[in-house]
Amino acid sequence: ARQHLRPGGLLILDLPGPSEPWLIQPGLVVTGTYPTQEGGIVLKLTDSRYDRARQVEEITVIYDETDAGGTTQRTVLGLSLRYVFHYELELLLRLAGLRLEAIYGDYDLNPYDEDAARMIAVAGRSD
C-alpha cells in the first residue's frame, strides 16, 4: 500500500472493533430476514467461533431461501477472519513504512476505545 500512496496521501483501514458482536456473543444467531422479488424470503444465520490465541474468527453464514411455494434451498459459506488489535496494527504500519496518524472508533470519528464498533485507522507515508 505504501508504494501506491503519493506524498501526502492517506491509507484508511476500516476494521471491526473490539465490541464486534460475534466476538462478544459467539454461536448461531439470526442476522436477518429479507423478502425476495418473487415473493419468497431469505433467512440469514451466522455461526461464529473465535479463537483468541490465534486472533481468528471462523464464520459460517447460512442462507435459507424459501420460495413462494414453500421450497427451501440452503447455501452455506465459510470464512476465516484474522483480527488485528490497535498496537499490532500500529507496528505493522510502521514496518510497512507508514505511520498511524489517527484512529477512530466509529464513522462519526469518535475516539477508539474498548467499546468501539469499528477500528478506523488513518495512516500516511513515514517519509
Image (cartoon, helix red, strand yellow):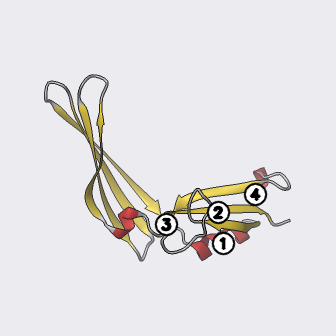
Q: Which residue is labeled 4 in the image?
A: 2
Is label 3 in a helix, a strand or a loop? loop
Q: Are marks 2 and 3 in contact (CB under 8 Å)?
A: no
Q: Position of residue 32 (x, y in %)?
A: 31, 46
Q: Earlier in the sequence, mark 4 or mark 1?
A: 4
Q: Mark 3 packing: few (<14 Cα in 10 Å), some, or many (20+)?
A: some
Residue kind at label 3, given as amino acid type: Tyr
Q: Earlier in the sequence, mark 2 or mark 3?
A: 3
Q: Earlier in the sequence, mark 4 or mark 3?
A: 4
Residue kind at label 4, given as amino acid type: Arg
Q: Mark 2 packing: few (<14 Cα in 10 Å), some, or many (20+)?
A: many
Residue at the image position 18 percent from the left and 25 percent from the top: 68
Residue kind at label 1, given as amino acid type: Glu
Residue at the image position 27 percent from the left and 37 percent from the top: 42
Q: Earlier in the sequence, mark 2 or mark 1?
A: 1
Q: Which residue is labeled 1 in the image?
A: 90
Is label 2 in a helix, a strand or a loop? strand
